[in-house]
Amino acid sequence: MKFVLDASVALSWLLEDAGAGQAYAVGIFNVLARPGAQAHVPATWSLEVAEAIAKCEARAVLLTSRSQAFQSTIAAAPILCDADTHSKALNETLQLARRYRLSAYAASYLELALRSSLSLATLDDDLRRAASSAGVRHLKPA
């Protein structure tokens, strides 16, 4: 199974702070562990994840040892970074951000899902609603 993975889901694997969405995030992690699974992410994904880790470590919410273990898990996961994110940013992604009132970062996930015809795994309610309006399926772990 191939899908677009929002940073909100991946970060909840690390921080375990998704509340009611934690079960969804764990389900997506299990989907990603299946043979043949691939998560596709926009080129900014690693920066979003790194920013959250750095902020949490600085606030002493997260131990460096835990984030390093998470980094190893992510490095071993079948997560593929999109090569075309930047070339789409000032056109398609910006148009989606405007249309759905999303941040450019959130719109980059929607743009990738639309361009790739893939479902989207996200915990972001605004992104999920925008994706639904745009005809992108929200990935439901089975």
Image (cartoon, rainbow, N blue to C red):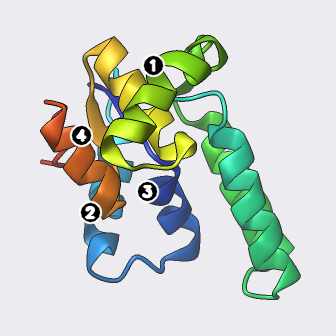
Distance (Cα) linking label 3 and label 1: 24 Å
Confirm or deny contact between disc 2 and disc 3 (CB under 8 A): yes
Task: Pinpoint residue 68: horizontal percent, then vertical percent.
Answer: 79, 59
Mark 1 element type: helix
Residue type at mark 1 is: Glu
Query: Which residue is label 4 attached to?
Result: 131
Which label's residue is closer to the chain start, 2 or 3? 3
The three-letter amino acid code for the residue at tag 4 is Ala
Whether residues under marks 4 and 1 lie with C-beta atoms below 8 angstroms apart, the answer is: no
Q: Amino acid at mark 2?
A: Tyr
Vertical placement of residue 70 versus 91, above or below: below
Q: Between disc 2 and disc 1, whose residue precedes? A: 2
Residue at 13 percent across and 30 percent down: it is 135
In terms of sequence position, does the residue under pointer 2 or pointer 4 come before the other? 2
Q: Answer few, some or many: residues within 10 Å of disc 4's Cα (few below 14, many 20 plus, some between 14 and 19).
A: many
Determine which residue is flagged by label 1: 92
Instruction: Say which residue appears at 60% left-offset and 21% top-offset.
Output: 90
Q: Which residue is identified by label 2? A: 24
Q: CA distance from mark 3 to mark 4?
A: 16 Å
Q: Can residue 33 be seen?
A: no
> CB under 8 Å between callouts 3 and 1?
no
Q: Secondary structure at mark 2?
A: helix
